[in-house]
Image (tube, rainbow, N blue to C red):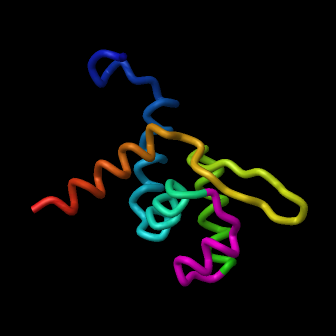
Amino acid sequence: MEGPMHDLDEQTLFTVSQTFKALSDPTRIRILHLLSVKECSVNTIAERLSLSQSTVSHQLRLLKNIRLVTSRREGTTVYYSPDDQHVLEVLEQTIHHSLHD
């Protein structure tokens, strides 16, 4: 584990800030939370969260670019799942904290 904050290099700081930026959007939080339960296609995510397919695709592209989700193709369908268990743990802990009195 790294020491004080000044030991963080610029790339690490950028990656951390991009991750928190991604987690600051309610739609992306909803998508990640759903994917933490099960792997889903764009259509399934759109249906379950009452979002348009284009919105889901756009958000998944952002999440994939910063390696928070990964995808696999099965025939013509692409399935998405979380790519980083650490970030999911932070998200779930934050949700749990928010539900606390």
Q: Is residue 10 above or below residue 33?
A: above
Q: Is residue 7 above or below residue 88?
A: above
Q: Is residue 86 left or right of residue 81?
A: left
Identified at 48% across, 47% down, the residue is: 18
As for residue 75 lying within the magenta part, the answer is no
- Quadrant where the N terminus is found in the figure: top left
Residue at 52% across, 65% down: 31
Q: Where does residue 89 sit, x and y in percent of width and height?
A: 39, 43
Give the residue displayed 46% in from the left and 47% down from the top: 19
Q: Which residues are magenta?
A: 39-52
User: In the rendered image, which quarter is residue 5 located in?
Assistant: top left
Residue 42 inside the magenta-drawn segment? yes
Q: Position of residue 74 (x, y in %)?
A: 84, 57
Q: Horizontally, is 20 left or right of 65 in the view?
A: left
Which quarter shows the C terminus?
Answer: bottom left
Q: Is residue 61 left or right of residue 100?
A: right
Q: 81 above or below 67?
A: below
Rendering coords of residue 36 (x, y %) = 50, 54
x and y percent of residue 20 in the render?
40, 49
Asked whether 27 or 78 is in front, the reply is: 78
Give the camera-side residue of 28 and 82: 82
Q: In the rendered view, would you say 63 is above or below 67?
A: below
Residue at (21, 54) in percent of width and height: 97
Residue 35 figure quarter: bottom right
Depth check: 50 or 11 in front? 50
